[in-house]
Image (spheres, coloured by chain):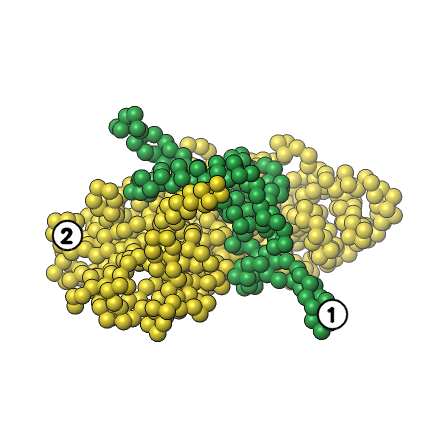
Amino acid sequence: MKTSLLFWGALAVFLGAALASDYENEEEERIIVDNKCKCAKVTSRFVPSKDNPQENVLERNIRIIVPLKSKQNITDPTSPLRTTFVYRMSELCKQCEPMEVELTDRIVTAEPSNNCTSTDACYTYDRNKCYTTTFPFLYGGEIKTVRAALTPASCYAD
Amino acid sequence: MTFLVFIFLLFFLQAESARISRSSPIFGPRQVTGLEGGSVTVKCFYPRSNVNRHDRKYWCKESTRQCATVISSNGYTAQDFVGRATITDYPEEGIFIVKISKLGGKDAGFYKCGIGLNERGLSFKVKLDVSQGSKVPEEAELYYVELEGSVTMSCTFDEIYASERKYLCKMGKNGCFTVVDSYRNVNLTYQGRVLLSNQQTPGSFSIYMTQLKKEDSGLYLCGVGQYGEKGESKELDVHVYEETDVPQGRHVINGVIGGSVSVECHYNRQRNYSIKYWCKWRKNSCTQLISNTVGTMSAQHEGRLVMHDDPKNGTFTILMNQLKAEDAGYYWCMTDDDTERKSAKELRIIDGQPALTGPKDIEANVGTKVTLPCSYPCKYYSYQKYWCKWSNTGCKSLLSHEQNQTGLVVDCNTENRIVYLTFDEVRNTDQGWYWCGVSHSGHYGETMAVYLRVKGDVVFRSETSEDAAIPSTGSENNPQNRGAVLDDSSLPSSQESNSSKVLLSVLLPIGAVCLLLATVFVVVKFRLLKRTELVSVGSYRTNISMSEFENPREFGAKDNAIINEAQETQLGGVDEYITTSGNSEGAEEPPKMKRGSKEEVDVAYTTFLLQANKVTQDKA
């Protein structure tokens, strides 16, 4: 487990250095994947080649923020800390949000990727979702189960 | 080892947070300047999503290691700033304002305004300068625009520049490149999306930009004269942010020469607009072509343009036909509200053939019978077809009918696939444009326009022919005869057929006859429950006078979408059949409507089975 952490740490440093070096060019950067569930972002941009400065080459950056303090089950605060973080490129790139596609003369909504039903655990909260949990609450000598919001700001009804 | 990792991560996160600030949806001034002892006000924008409106807002001061909170909307204020910092949130507008007063030299530095519990991600970096002089430099004006939204930027300059060149340029790596100027130069990437127009006061102008993309974020300059050479300029800072789920519609519409297009424009249905219109973009103006208010239409669009407003869905549909090569270009859907998204659509003329076909110009003599055909391809088989009479305020739906005598339809290719509009005897007032079109689940599709020219004497009754006299009186008794207006029954906007009273009186006796027929088949039906399934597929779209049954049953069939749809199509057919037979009281009966009694019974039977099947389904 520790080796894996070290690996990600090293990756972070490597990417950080890459990011700091060329700040001006960032406007041309394109976001390929922004996976909020796993806190991973893949971008690409053209940079001058190291071998031939006249030529531009495509550079792909993978940025991962590892939430070290997240629980194994993010909706259960009593679960132990997560120690393994797995990032599969194919999973990150999945587009499960339905989008509009034009078919000759009609517009249909479709999910761009298949197997979107697989419930892979998220490593962090989705800001637009409300997460709740239940806990026992002693009141007047009676134990009641009370529902509590884990992300209060996201739980307001409009 | 864990410590090592931690250090590494720290490094990483720092680089990350600096970088993210530019792509985050939070936006504010890049730099603010305040006088020593004076105050500064910082306005930060955020997307008005539910969570953003309720989440914590903060203003923090950056140091080498972290961003220390100065003040937050939770009620915390750092010791240094007690009594001289305030934070006010305006969730409905999506802004919060930080005010710091009694500025001192040590307050200068980098700050962040943001949302959430930590400063990662949702924040914007602001540089605070404390000046010892007496003048504060002018700050860039901020524009916070939703993705695909639009913005109006106003630039005011002195009157002496009234005759100078006016421009908007975007700051890039190699200076400021022109986006649009008053000499009608438009940058290629802004083609069709930008408009520069002069204001009433000389020297002032406004720039209107629509369909903003992420790449449009950045610093702009609007000015008079030439950038970097002469004249004045003003800084504009534009930030495009992504809101959650806003329907976009498509931006490129393809049409063929002679064909038609249908464009849906979205607007906010919670708001009331006094005007909605459709205009063609022309470098420095947008020429209004059609609007929801009664107006005139240019001769070249006569008979070619219709607007259907659907306030329930927040859309208006523009139908345009008889396309020509010069129609290609950019069009805008407009509303009178400034903050509303005004979408631009590009119309491209491509090769191909229109799908709806038929004669486009029909000449007829007064008093004669005229039939306007409109044939459609198989892809529109399940669509609703309609005919309507065009006027510059809309297209009034007319009663049309389809020649579909076989009743049992399995293969579309063997069908006629023609929708007819028939005038039993045409009048001078019938001259004009008629449209044939298709629609599908509330969306309008292709259309075809036909011009009907009526020749002959102006005074119809001067013809002393005996034959003409009889249909003339008949037509006065029957309003349906005149192209038969039937309350949009064939249009998707009104799904229920509310026939006129005249129609009802005709319907009732026929319905009674059918009721009789139906009771005869009740017993048979219950025996053949399994077979009904098959038959009902075949009898889809049969034209029979069973509407008395259908109306009450429609309520019961609401949950069965497919059958309901079948019924709608059928209803249209029913109305049309009955109307024609109603007309025939005065005039000769159209030959195509004649049916052998055996055939009629057959058809009535199948429809009944369809109905009965539904009833049993409902019960189950």
Q: Is residue B435 above or below residue B118?
A: above
Q: Nearer the viewer, mark 1 or mark 2?
A: 1
The chain containing the residue under callout 1 comes to: A
Tell me residue B297's x, y (percent).
Answer: 36, 54
Identity of the amino acid at label 1? Glu
Task: List x then y, in percent, for residue B374.
Answer: 53, 40
Which element type, helix, strand or loop, lies under badge 1?
Answer: strand
Q: Nearer the viewer, residue B214 or A33?
A: A33
The image position of residue A133, as x and y in percent, is 63, 58
Given residues B480 and B141, the one toward you in this image is B141
Q: What residue sits right under mark 1 in the picture?
A: A142
Q: Residue at coordinates 38% horizontally, 55% vertically from top-left?
A: B66
Mark identifier at residue B451: none
Depth check: give the residue in front, B32 or B105: B105
Q: Quadrant of residue B7?
A: top left
| Chain coloured green here | A
User: Horizontally, is B364 left or right of A115 in the view?
Assistant: left
Residue at image point 31% right, 39% down = A21
Q: Which residue is mark 2?
A: B225
The hue in which chain B appears in the rendered picture of the protein: yellow
Q: State left or right for residue B259 relative to residue A151.
A: left
Left or right: A80 with respect to A65? Answer: right
Dots 1 and 2: beta carbons under 8 Å?
Answer: no
Residue sitting nearer the eye, B592 or B448: B448
Give the distance between the C-alpha atoms of the residues marked 1 and 2, in whole angstroms. 79 Å
- Residue B472 in percent (x, y) is at 56, 55
